[in-house]
Amino acid sequence: MENINEKEELQDELFPKAKKKKSILFPIIFGAIILVGGFFGYRYYKYSQAHEETDDAQIAANLSPVISKISGYVSEVKVKDNQFVKKGDTLIILDNKDQKLMLDQAEAALGTAQSNIASARAASAATGKNINTSRAAVITATSQIEAAKVNVRRTSQDLARYSNLIKDHSITQQQYDVALAAKQTADAQLKVLIDQRNQIAQQQGVVNSQTAASSEQIAVATSVAKQREVDVENAKLNLSYTVITAPADGFVSKVPIQKGQFLQAGAQLFSIVLDNSKWVVANFKETQLSKMLEGQKVEIDIDAYPNKKFEGVVSSFSPATGSTFSILPPDNASGNFVKVVQRLPVKINFVNIDQKIEDRLRAGMNVNVTVSVE
């Protein structure tokens, strides 16, 4: 024990300055650490006041649903999973036997309707000729009546004169009888002509009614023909729907359709991710939005490209939080309420992104975004 104490005393005598330096160095290092930590802490505080960031963000793109407009059985599938297609490319072909039959029926009905129009027009033309004949007959009868009236007036005058002459015995009874007979004959002829004209007028009324009926038949036949034309166009349209085509350029998603499968009209078959611009949808907490505005610059980190920074700009804010658009939105009036910080989707557009990189981006990829809110 004495030897140990002697060694320590000897060491203190030999190295007194080193021990003193060690006791001074520790506070210096500790102080330096505090200063450096405070410096970087202050910088982080200033940075956090001027920036808002979140990792709840994904790449988004336009999706176009492929929908069957008619019901039918799948005859052929012309597309595969993840295949790139152009607008108008054939994707699926449905069995079209029923649609062809409906088109044939519609075209046959249209032919019948057009024949009815031709028949109605022919009948109307014949009725028009009858009208012209009746009008001519009326004119002729009227002229004959006028001539008969003249004859009646003449025979009446002759009979009156002969009546005076026979009283004076200036003429014979036979001459008077001839004048009387002529007067009676003229009256009878006038009556016959008037009756004939009345009959012709009645016939003309019938012909006019037939003409009106013919015109109505033409109008009805024309209307029916137009309806049959619409039926033909509708049948052609339904026939075209048996070929389901791509609504736009893009990549086909998973195709769960098989040959022989029955498709319901209006059912979504799969989707096409459109081959156009991509953007980012970032879900920020509501507490991060007080300083955020449209047009602010954004730094984007894509997990698929960890060593590359991308630029963006705040484009727009969703009109409601994400939970509002959910299938079962929260009901806070049920009695039990737990306040949860809501998130609001914010749309961010890329700025000056390489087209090759943008083409390789896929909807749903994770990204980190930092918005400069200065």
Image (cartoon, rainbow, N blue to C red):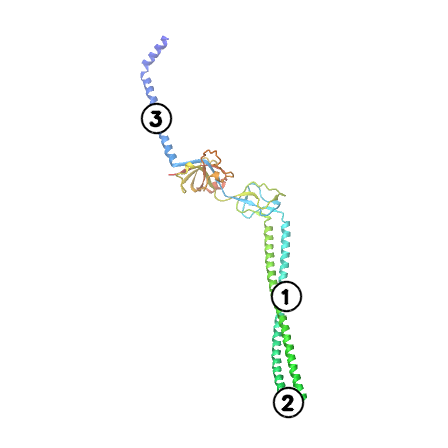
The residue furthest front is: 167
Element at badge 2?
Answer: helix
- Of the image marks 1 and 2, the number of the one nearer the N terminus: 1
Residue 371 in the image, given as x and y percentages of width and height = 41, 38
Q: In the image, which is nearer the foreground, mark 3 or mark 2? A: 2
Element at badge 1?
Answer: helix
At x 61%, y 74%, the residue is 138
At x 35%, y 26%, the residue is 34
Q: In the image, which is nearer the foreground, mark 1 or mark 3? A: 1
Q: Is residue 260 left or right of residue 281?
A: right
Give the alpha-carbon distance from disc 1 to disc 3, as whole Å: 114 Å
Give the alpha-carbon distance from disc 3 to disc 2, as whole Å: 170 Å
Residues at discs 1 and 3 in contact (Cβ within 8 Å): no
Give the alpha-carbon distance from disc 1 to disc 2, as whole Å: 64 Å
Q: Amino acid at mark 3?
A: Ala
Q: Amino acid at mark 1?
A: Ala
Front residue of 309/207: it is 207
Front residue of 234/302: it is 234
Q: In the image, which is nearer the foreground, mark 1 or mark 2? A: 2
> Badge 2, how many Cα within 10 Å: few under 14, some, many 20+?
few
Residue 313 in the image, given as x and y percentages of width and height = 42, 41
Please determine whether, in this image, residue 14 is positioned above or below residue 91. above
Residues at discs 1 and 2 in contact (Cβ within 8 Å): no
Q: Is residue 288 left or right of residue 100?
A: left
Q: Which residue is mark 3?
A: 32
Q: Which residue is mark 2?
A: 167
Front residue of 43/80: it is 43
Element at badge 3?
Answer: helix
Please determine whether, in this image, residue 26 is positioned above or below residue 199. above
Q: Which residue is mark 1?
A: 123
Q: Amino acid at mark 2?
A: Lys
